[in-house]
Amino acid sequence: MAQLTCENLALGYEGKTVVSDLSFAVNSGEYLCIVGENGSGKSTLMKTILNLKTPQSGKITTDSGFAATEIGYMPQQTAAQKDFPASVREVVRSGCLNRVGLRPFFNRAEKQLAEDNMKRLGIEHLAKRCYRELSGGQQQRVLLARALCATHKILLLDEPAAGLDPKATAEMYDIISDLNKSGTTIIMISHDIEASVKYASHILHIGNGESMFFGTKDEYVSRGGYGA
C-alpha cells in the first residue's frame, strides 16, 4: 500500500495555478526526486504534502499507519536560520516537538531519540556546540537528525545539498542513500539531475503548469530526461 498518494492535484499561489492534474503515489522504501524548473511548483507541492498549503483541487492521502504531522521535513535554510543561537542538541531535540504535546519538557525516550540520531549522523561530538558555529555540511546533518526525530518512516527534503561544497554534497547524498537503504522513504526536491538519477528509484518532473513525467529513474533516462 502506498504511504503517500496524490490524486488530480492542482496547486498554485497568489491565484496562479502552477501545477494541474498531478497524480502519483510513493510506496514504502522508495526514493522519489522531484525535479523541474524554478517556479514549476516543486516547493508548493512539498508544502501541500505537509498541510502547510491547501490544494486548489484534488487530494493527498497517507497510509493509516501515520499522519502528515509525523513526516520528517528538512527545509531549505534561510540566512537567519543558519545563524540560530542554539546548541546542536537543542536543535535536534526540537524534532520531537510533535510528540511532546502539552508537556513542558522532553521525556527520557525523546532525549534518547535525539542522541541516537546524532550518533547515526556522526554529529554526537558536536552536541554542545552552537549551531551557528558549524560548517554548512555539519548544519545540514543537524537538520537531518532533527527531521529523523519527527519520524523514521518518510522524509521530505528540500534541496538538502544546496550551498554545500562538493565533498559535503557527496557526503550528504550518501547519508540520505543509506537512510533509504535502511527503510526510510525519501521524497527530495533537487536541481541536481545527475544525483537524482544516481540515487533515486523514481523521478517526478514537473513544469509548464502540468506534470511532465512520473516513473522510475530508468524510464526517465530512457525518455531523454537525463541531462534535460
Image (cartoon, rainbow, N blue to C red):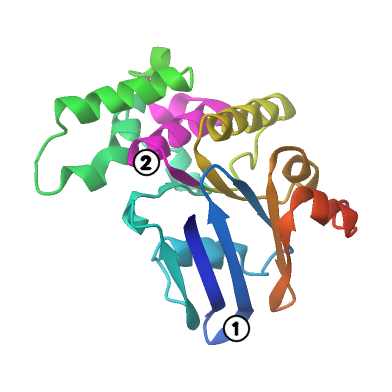
Residue nearest the viewer, comparing 35 with 162 = 35
Q: Which residues are magenta?
A: 129-155
> Mark 1 falls on what kind of element?
strand
State which quadrant residue 180 falls in: top right
86 up-or-down from 211: above or below = above
- Mark sitting on residue 151: 2
Q: Earlier in the sequence, mark 1 or mark 2?
A: 1
Find residue 143 and report its image quarter: top left
Q: CA distance from mark 1 to mark 2?
A: 31 Å
Quadrant showing the C terminus: bottom right
Tell us which disc is closer to us: 1 or 2: 2
Q: Is residue 149 on the magenta stretch?
A: yes
In the rendered image, residue 48, in percent from the top left (x then y), is placed at: 46, 67
Q: Is 47 placed above or below 21 here?
A: above
Residue picked out by circle 1: 17
Give percent across and percent down for residue 36.
73, 62
Left or right: residue 106 versus residue 9 is: left
Residue 158 percent coordinates (x, y): 56, 50
Question: Residue 186: which quarter of the image?
Answer: top right
At x 25%, y 47%, the residue is 98
